[in-house]
Image (tube, rainbow, N blue to C red):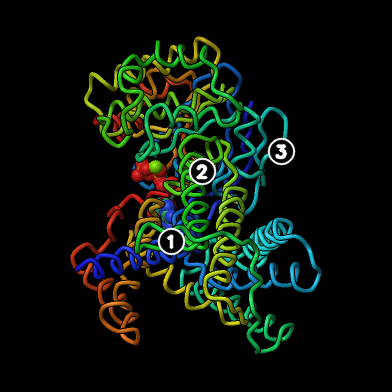
Amino acid sequence: MMNFFTSLINNLISGLSVGSIYALIALGYTMVYGIAKMLNFAHGDIIMVGAFAVIVSVSSLGLPSIIAILIAVAVCVVLGVVIEAIAYRPLRNASPLAVLITAIGVSYLLQNLALLIFGSTQYSFPRLFQMEAIHFGQITISGQSIITLLVTTIIMIALHFFINQTKIGKAMRAVSEDKGAAELMGISVNRTISVTFAIGSGLAAIAGLFYGLTYGFIGPYTGSMPGIKAFVAAVFGGIGSIPGAMLGGILLGVIESFSKAYISTELSDAIVFGILILVLTIRPFGLLGKKTNEKV
Amino acid sequence: MLQVNNINVYYGKIHAVKDISFHVNEGEIVSLIGANGAGKSTTIHTISGLLHSKTGSISFLGEDITKAEAYKLVYKGLAHVPEGRRIFLNMTVMENLEMGAYSKGKVSSEDLDKIFQRFPRLKERRKQIAGTLSGGEQQMLAMGRALMSHPKLLMLDEPSMGLAPILVEQIFDIIQELNRTGTTILLVEQNAEMALKVADRAYVLESGSIVLSGAGKDLISSDSIRQAYLGG
Ligand SMILES: Nc1ncnc2c1ncn2[C@@H]1O[C@H](COP(=O)(O)OP(=O)(O)OP(=O)(O)O)[C@@H](O)[C@H]1O
Ligand SMILES: [Mg+2]
C-alpha cells in the first residue's frame, strides 16, 4: 500500500513536470490562435530550434548555460517574428486552409533546414545545471522536475499578469476579440500579432530547453511530437484560453504519466488522445473554452 | 476638416460606394442618412481606414489619408464608433475605456471623470464585464471609449440602433452637447428624423450614391425626404 502511494506521488510529479513543458508549448498555440486566429503548426519545430541553439552554444561554442539559454530564447523570438512577417502576414485575409498549409510548409522547412545543418543523428543535450534531488522518505523529486516546475510556474504567473494588467497585454485581448475595433482604438494589429509570436516562440525556446533536459537527445524531428501533444493540450483546455492551455498541458502530462506507469507505455498516447476525444464530445469547446467569444 | 472626393469602394465585385463626394467643416454636425444597404457604413469605414477606396481621395485636417492605416488615424484625431458598438465584450467597462485611451498613452483621471460625469451609469459599472451591459449602456460605453482619444472628428454609425425612444433622445442630447463643447460630428443614421433635426447639413445616400444634400432643416421639410424616410 505504501509502495503504491509512493509510486503514485512519483508519477504525479513526473507528470506535472512533463505537463508543464506541454503547457509552455500549448500557451504559444493558444495565444497565436486567440489573437491571429490561426493554427501555427510550425510552433513545435521552434522547440527543436531552441534546443539546437542551446546545444550549439554550449557544446560547440563553450558558452555558459545562462548565456546559452538567452541565445536560445533570442533566436526563437526572432525566428517566430520573422516567420509571422514573411509567411503569415501576407495571408492575413486568405482562407484558413491556405494559412494552415503554409504553416505545415514552414514546419517542414524548419525540419529540413535542421536536417541539412545537423544531419539526422540525435545530439545529446548538455546538462545545463546540477541540482540535487530532494527526498521525502520514499518519495524522490529530481532536481530536473523542481527546476521545471519552478520556472514554468513563474512564467505562467508572469504571463497572467502581463495579459491582464499591462497595456500591451490588454491590447492583445482587445485584438483577440475584435481586430477592427482594436484598430479603431489606435492599436496596431500587426504589431500586436508580432508580440504574440515573440512571446509564444520565447516560451517554446524555454520548453525546448526543458524538453532537452528531460529526454536528453535532440534531432531535427524532435519538435513534432511535443508540438502535437501541446496542440492537443491547447484544444483540451479550450483553444484560445490561456488558463485552458496551462490546465490542458498539465492534465495531459499527468494522464500520460499515469497511463505509462499503470496501464501501458505503448498505449499511453492512444489513451491521451482517447480522453481528449471524450472530453470534446462532452465539452466541444474544451475544458475552459468559450462558445462564442474567444478569450486570449 | 474632412474632405471626401469621388471615392469608389468595392467588396470584390460589389460596387458599394459610387463616386461620392462630401465634406465636413470644423464645428459642424453632418448627417449621412439612407436606407439599409445604401453604403453608409462602407463610407465611414473607408474614412477611418478599415476599408480603402479604389479611386478618389480623402483628406483630414489638410492631410491626405486615402491610404492611411486605421490605427494611425486615431492619433490624428479621428474616432469612429462602429455600427453595433463593437465594445470588447470580455473586458471590463474600465478596460474598454483604457483601450479607448490607447493612443494617449496613459488614462488620465480627468478624462475618466469627464466620461463618468457624462455617463454616470458607466461609473457604477466600471468593474463589470462589458458583455453584461444593457444595449443603451453598451452604446454609452462605445461613445465614452471613443471620447477617451480626444477626437477632433467623431464619427458615429447608427448610435440609436435598437434603443428605446427615451434612450435615443438621451444619445442625441449627448451628441449635441459634445458638438457644443468642440467636437465635430459625422453622424450616420437610419433614424432620419432625429439625424436631420440635429444636423447642420446632411447628405442622403441611395444605393451607393449621394442623391440629395442640404441643410438639415431644409431636408426635413422636403417632400421627397418626407416620403422616402419620414413615413409621409
Ligand atoms: N463585407 C461585405 N461583403 C460584401 N458586401 C458587403 C459587405 N458589407 C456590406 N456589403 C454590401 O455593401 C452595400 C452597402 O452596405 P453598408 O453596410 O455600407 O450599408 P449601410 O448603409 O450601412 O446599411 P445599414 O443601414 O443596414 O447599416 C450593401 O449592398 C451590402 O450588402
Ligand atoms: Mg450600416
Distance between mark 3 and mark 2 Cα atoms:
43 Å
Say whether residue A160 is left or right of residue A110: left
Q: Amino acid at mark 1?
A: Ile
Q: Nearer the viewer, residue B45 or A3?
A: A3
Which residue position holds label 3?
B64
Q: Secondary structure at mark 1?
A: strand
Q: Residue at x 58, y 43 (%)?
A: B49
Q: Chain of mark 3?
A: B
Residue B20: percent from the left, percent from the top? Answer: 56, 42
Residue nearest the viewer, comparing A48 with A153? A153
Chain letter of disc 1? Answer: A
**Where does label 2 land, which residue?**
A158
- Amino acid at circle 2: Ala
Do the residues bearing badges 2 and 1 touch, measured as CB atoms within 8 Å? no
Q: Look at the numbered discs 3 and 2 and tell me whether their residues touch, using CB distance below 8 Å.
A: no
Earlier sequence position, callout 2 versus callout 1: 1
Provide the secondary structure element on which disc 3 rests.
strand
Other-residue count near label 1 (Cα within 10 Å), few / some / many at <14 / 14–19 / ≥20 = some
Q: CA distance from mark 2 to mark 1?
A: 25 Å
Whether label 1 touches label 3, CB < 8 Å = no
Placement of A123 over or under B116, stated as above or below: below
Give coordinates of residue A42: x percent, y percent. Answer: 56, 72
Q: Same chain, marks 2 and 1?
A: yes
Amino acid on which the number 3 mark rests in the picture:
Asp
Q: Is ligand 1 less than 8 Å from the beta carbon at label 1?
A: no
* Identity of the residue drawn at 36% across and 14% down: B173
On the image, numbered disc 1 is attached to which residue?
A141
